[in-house]
Structures are given as structure tokens and as C-alpha cells.
Amino acid sequence: MEVGFHLGPVVLTGTDLGTQWREHIDQVAAAADHGFGFFSVGTHFAVHPFQYFNIYPWLARLTAAAPELTVVSSVVLVPLANPLEVAEQVATLDVLSGGRFRFGCGLGYRPVEFDMFETSLRHRAARFTEALEVMRRLWAEDTVTHHGRFFHFDEVRPGVRPVQDPHPPVWIATNSEPATRRAATVGDAPFWSPFLGGEALRRHHELHERTRREHGRPAPAEVPIAREFSIGRTRAQAIEDGRAGMIRKWEVYAEHGLQDSLSEKDKELTGDFEEMARETFILGDPGECAEEIARYGEEFGITHMKLRVQYPGMPHDKVMERIALTGAVIERLR
């Protein structure tokens, strides 16, 4: 199993941007030194109280800092963009990474983002599906003409093509049953959400497998998952170091309307810290974390484990310490 380091929106507004940028470079380089297999960056806009760099230049610069790591978008909000732009950005990142890019993508859920981009939240799923169809053609065909519900163009010739043939693997974010079916029918892999745990994850896993079989599609070659993560030299330290920041991060998710994007059966899983820690978090000392990560591989066939190591208010030296401790976990998994 590959373990990945996620750079998400956790740095509070007002932090010096130059310092934030340099620390991110140091963190990704340290992740490479300690055996991580990939790093990931996501897409969100206007994420107050956090500040967050734009995904495409950010991924490109971090790729140069750790050229041996696989590069993952986690995730691109496809309905907010034109598919030609996204297709060429993805192809560019695949070239810059030497064919090590994974295209994590999803719908998005925040009304403010759809309003700012003058795009319908209501039609986001249909727009996503059509855009992905267009992108696959742009990656594979010399000239593309398309006239659909949302996009219209004639004889478009892409300016750049991906290294991977026919394109980087498409990991589709899964927060709900419709998303799980979407990943099974038009994706290369489900990208399991950090909000799915316990019986909910098992239910979605079974739905995905069943839907792929019904559509005559083989099992995915890669199965990634995202988890909230806190590690310490002891379990008590892991809880102490992570608790306040993890709670704050989830409070912001709630403020941004996350629960509205979840299936009714899954909303019950976004409860208090103790409940979420039991259901979806990975936390403890290196041995406990290694056992829990290995369990995901055994039960759900997980091949890529994306971990959030930093949380709001956490200083850089603490993040670097946690990266090093995670290196001990990775050693145990080998």
C-alpha cells in the first residue's frame, strides 16, 4: 500500500504566505525522505478562515520538490471548469511528473463556489459526467467535435497530451451513493471519502463492486481512500496533538455545508470527536496506526492511503515530527 501526504486547507488566514509556501515544500520533501509514495493537493475557493493556494501551479512546484513521488489532485472540482482547460492542465501535470499523475476529481458541494463561477449546483452531476466524457476524448483523439447539453465545440486540437496512455487514472470522489455509482460506471477508481467509515464504507464498497459487475467492468487496479490522521509517540499524545485541530477542521466542513452532500444514511456519521475517531479516523502510536492502515488493505483492498497530517493551529515543527513518525508506520507496512 502507498501512503500519501495531503496538503489541505488548514493554514489560518493571516499566516505569512511565503512562510506557508516554504513550509509546504519542506513537508513534501520530508514525506519523500520518510517513505511516502504520493502527495496530494485539493481545490477549493474562498475557504475562510483558511488560506489555500491554487491547485495547478501548486502541484507543479511541489512536483519539483519531490520528483520521485506520485502526484494526486484531491480533488479537482470538475463542474466549475471548462473541460478543455482541465484536460490540458491534467496533461501538463502528467508530463511534468513523468507520467506519475493521478486525476482525483469530484463534484464539489459549496454553493458559494458554484455561485462565484456562475454554474448550477443542481446540474453539477450531469455537467461532471459530460465534462469527463469530453476530457477522455481530448486526451485520446487528434481532433474533437462535441455538442452536448453543457459544452459545444468543433474540431478542437488539444495543445498537450498526457504521458500515460490513454490518460492518467481517474479517481472519482465518493461521498454518497450516487457518487459511488458514478465512480463504478465512469471512473477508473473510487476515491473513498474521509467521511465514510465503519458500516457506511462497507456498504459503499459493496455497492461499487456490484455496480461495476452489472456494467461489465473489471475491478479497479487502484483503490484510494482519504483518512483523518493523528500520530504520536503514544496514543494519548496523538489525541492531545490532534483533537483541537481536527474538531476545528470538521466545524469548518459543517459551516461550508458538507452534510448537504452526504447520503441520509451517512449524515449520522458526522458526529462528535469520539464517534468520528472510532468510525473514520486513524490515530495512535506508530504500531496502532500501522495495524489500522493494514486493516483497510485487508478489508477493502485499499492501495493508496491519503493521510491528513496537519490541522489548524499546528506548528510546522510538529508537522515535521508527525511526518517522521509516519515513516515508522510505513516501514512496518513493508
Image (tube, grey):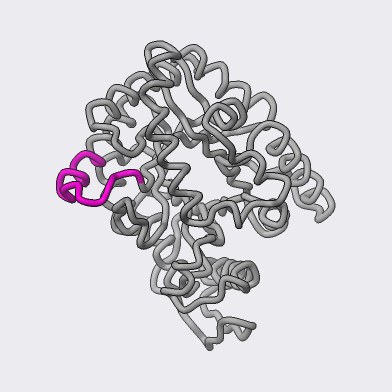
Q: Quadrant of the N terminus?
A: top right
In the depicted view, which residue is nearer to us: 281 or 252?
Answer: 252
| 101 in the magenta segment | no
Taking the spot 44% from the left edge, 36% from the top edge, the residue there is: 247
Residue 43 image position (x, y, % from top left): 41, 57
In the depicted view, which residue is nearer to us: 297 or 120?
Answer: 120
Residue 169 image position (x, y, % from top left): 55, 51
133 left or right of 64? Answer: right
185 left or right of 26? Answer: right
Taking the spot 59% from the left edge, 25% from the top edge, the residue there is: 278
Residue 145 image position (x, y, % from top left): 57, 84
Q: How many numbered circles does the render carry?
A: 0
116 left or right of 266? Answer: left
Residue 220 image position (x, y, % from top left): 67, 44
Q: Vertically, is 251 above or below 179?
A: above
Spot the residue most to the right.
214
In the depicted view, which residue is nearer to us: 82 or 215?
Answer: 82
| 16 in the magenta segment | yes
Q: Quadrant of residue 330?
A: top left
Taking the spot 39% from the left edge, 73% from the top edge, the residue there is: 159
In the depicted view, which residue is nearer to us: 194 or 35?
Answer: 194
Identify the magenta region: 10-25
